[in-house]
Image: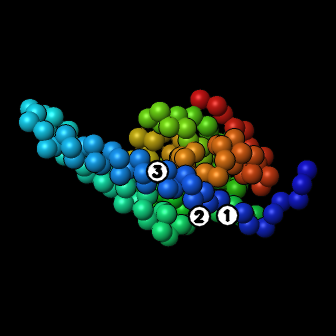
Amino acid sequence: MNPTPQVVTVRTPTAKAVATLVCGLLMTAVTGFVLLQPVPLVVKVVGWVGIVFFGTCTILALRAVLWPNPVLLLDGEGVEIRHSAFGRVRIPWDDVDHLVIGKVFGQRMLGIVPKDIEAWLATHAPAARVLLEANLAYGAPYWVAESTLPGTCEDVARMMQRYRPVAVIQR
């Protein structure tokens, strides 16, 4: 087995960030185009929801292109999830129970499951807890999208296993 590196910084490749930005711009434009058409009110509501959703995604993608930040930091102490709606989350390796590779809303994701999920949920604000509990329906409270990783979920899971050999469950 190779010696464990001190710190590994996992970053989104620039090409993936640019592709996400282009998709966001395209989808925002499409939903904006829908709003300009003579369509029923329900379609207009869907158009506005699309503008808000895809516009937000586009802004976040632009931020990722202009000011790239690490998605994950791995070191001898634990894993820090930095690309999260809940801010930075640091989980010591001793608290990691297993990893999950699955799909959330059709997107491949790498999930991190702490040993005492309830204790980890208690460390978050109430609104974040609700979202994390919803994530549990997919198998893990903490998820990282494969589209933000430099390789596949399996590649990053192998990197993580160099620090703590835990099970990886495919869903």
Q: Residue at x 53, y 66 (%)?
A: 68
Badge 2 amino acid: Pro
Helix, strand or loop at label 1? It is strand
Q: CA distance from mark 2 to mark 1?
A: 6 Å
Q: Which mark is residue 20?
A: 3
Residue located beneath label 1 in the image: 9
Position of residue 97 measured from the top left corner of the image (x, y, whole percent): 66, 45
Q: Tell me, yes or no, whether the two marked residues, 2 and 1, touch with CB atoms within 8 Å.
A: yes
Numbered disc in front, either 3 or 2: 3
Ranked by sequence position, the earlier of labels 2 and 1 is: 1
In the rendered view, does 43 fall on the left or right side of 122?
left
Query: How is the rendered protein coloured?
Result: rainbow
Q: Residues within 10 Å of mark 3 (few under 14, many from 20)?
A: many
Q: CA distance from mark 3 to mark 2?
A: 16 Å
Q: Tell me, yes or no, whether the two marked residues, 1 and 3, touch with CB atoms within 8 Å.
A: no
Vertical side of 135 occupied by 124: above or below:
below
In the rendered view, does 77 fall on the left or right side of 120?
right
Badge 3 amino acid: Thr
Vertical side of 59 occupied by 129: above or below:
above
